[in-house]
Image (spheres, helix red, strand yellow):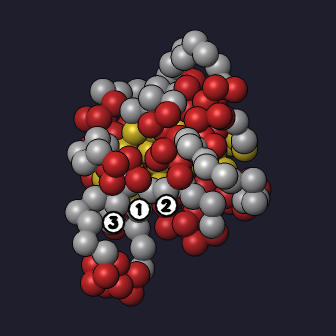
Amino acid sequence: MTYVGHPLTDQNKAAETQVVRGTSVMLMPGSRKFEIERMLLPMLKAFERVRSSKPGLEAVVLLADNMSEEWAKEQAARVVSVETLAAISWKKGNVIGEMQRARAGILKSGTCNLEGAIAELPFVCVYSGTLLAKMIVSTFVKLKEYSPVNVMKAGTVTELIRVRHDEAELEREDRKSTRL
């Protein structure tokens, strides 16, 4: 048996054929609790900062099916204003379709980067691991870029690896790469 292709391309065929970009920013913080804790809060702070100069801007947080929306909202309420929370939609599923409706994205490194590329979504790739994980990866993995998209074609998307410590950098890159 020979398999050629990738299941994500099948999802793209099933998604909308006519891409209509909206005005929302897609935020995809990951599918594990520790990723949400590390990635969602800087993403939301960056969105809030961008939104301060563009009050009509909205965000869509696309959560993995295994994530509790209520828990994620509780995390968000700790770091952003009530007004910002009101500008955020929380969704699950239909990843490619949601990406095709978004104007831009801030995506955690991983499969969602491939989905973003398939959906032709302009995005910034982000990740922030532990110091131990960084040491292990830098010792054994000789890559300069970590997004699956950049592994296939170097320099395709901007990568920010330590956003937990500097959400202002995430905001700058999001503005630059998406012209928000």
First of labels 2, 3 by sequence position = 2
Q: Nearer the viewer, mark 2 or mark 1?
A: 1
- Image check: 19 left or right of 130? right
> 12 or 123: which is nearer to us?
12
Q: Which residue appears at 35% of the width and 85% of the height?
A: 136
Labelled pair 2, 3 in contact (Cβ < 8 Å): no
Q: Where in the figure is residue 159, as x and y percent of width and height? A: 31, 53
Q: Which residue appears at 28% of the width and 78% of the height?
A: 138
First of labels 2, 1 by sequence position = 2
> 36 or 147: which is nearer to us?
147
Tell me how far mark 2 sits from mark 3, CA to CA: 10 Å
- Image check: 162 left or right of 44? left
Labelled pair 2, 1 in contact (Cβ < 8 Å): yes
Q: Give the class, few, some or many, for how many residues have Cα within 10 Å of label 2's Cα (few <14, many ≥20).
A: many
Labelled pair 3, 1 in contact (Cβ < 8 Å): no
First of labels 3, 1 by sequence position = 1
> Disc 2 marks which residue?
39
> Disc 1 marks which residue?
127
SS category of the residue bearing label 3: loop
Image height check: is 59 above or below 136?
above
SS category of the residue bearing label 1: loop
- At label 3, the amino acid type is Arg
Image height check: is 178 above or below 138?
above
